[in-house]
Image (tube, grey):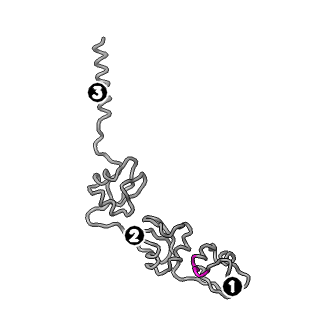
Amino acid sequence: MSFKRNARIIVLLAILFSSLGFTGTASAYTCSTYITVQWGDTLSGIARLCGTTTYAIQAANPGLGSWVYAGQVLYIPTGYSYPPVYYPPSSGTYVVQWGDTLGKIAARIGVSYYDILAVNPQIWNPSLIYGGQVINLPAVAPVYHTVLSGETLRIIAGYYGASVYSLQLLNPQLYDPNWIYAGQVIRVR
């Protein structure tokens, strides 16, 4: 009786251990130009799987450190191809690249630094923009308004669907937003 019992235990353990064996190198994705990081992936594991180096992946993805997270989309360099370069249009949105500053972006599209700040109220510190951040770009042609008697910045902002803050950014010459006068020309876009 004990022989049968021991044989059953051995067979059961053999089945259990064989089911816990290695699964090989199966992956949830194949390497292509862009991949989405899966839970448990590491940068070195992705590099090994795709036949490249961690340094090449980091160079192709500006701002990427040594950690990746699930859901992150990475550009995987192959051969001599380079990641796409985003050239900003004259208005719309722009994806900030590594090394960009608001001043460089403004000079590239022909607007002022303050124009970009005026259409991006989400930017609290203009010195802290990062690669991959999406910002709004202003229209190239500025729009001006001549202040009429009794108008305030709040009233003018309402006319143009802007905020008082954006008008202040567009008009750095206004030291006190409560002190504007009739006949004064201010920029509204």
Which is more N-terminal, label 1 or label 2?
A: 2
Image point 65% across, 86% down: which residue? 184
Q: Is residue 139 magenta?
A: no
Circle 1 residues within 10 Å: few <14, some 14–19, many ≥20: some
Asked if the residue under mark 3 is in contact with the one under mark 1, i.e. CB atoms within 8 Å, the reply is no
Identify the residue at horizontal 36%, vertical 59% (top origin): 34
Query: Which of the two residues, 69 or 6, is positioned nearer the viewer here?
Result: 69
Q: Quadrant of the N terminus?
A: top left
Q: As rendered, which of 84 and 57 lies closer to the eye? A: 57
Between disc 1 and disc 3, the foreground one is 1
Amino acid residing under circle 1: Tyr
The outermost residue toward the right is: 150
| Percent x, y of residue 69 | 41, 52
Between the C-alphas of marks 1 and 3, the distance is 90 Å
Farthest residue toward the top?
A: 1
Q: What secondary structure predominates along the stretch shown in magenta?
A: loop
Which segment is the magenta one?
Answer: 169-174
Which residue is depicted at the point 53% across and 77% down? 115
Find disc 3 in the rendering and name its residue.
14
- Marks 2 and 3 sit apart, C-alpha to C-alpha, by 58 Å
Q: Which mark is residue 171?
A: none
Who is closer to the viewer here, 24 or 74? 74
The amino acid type, in three-letter code, at marker 2 is: Gly
Above/below status of 19 relative to 45: above
Q: Which residue is mark 1?
A: 181
* N-term-proximal mark, 2 vs 3: 3
Q: Is residue 171 magenta?
A: yes
Residue 99 has which mark?
2
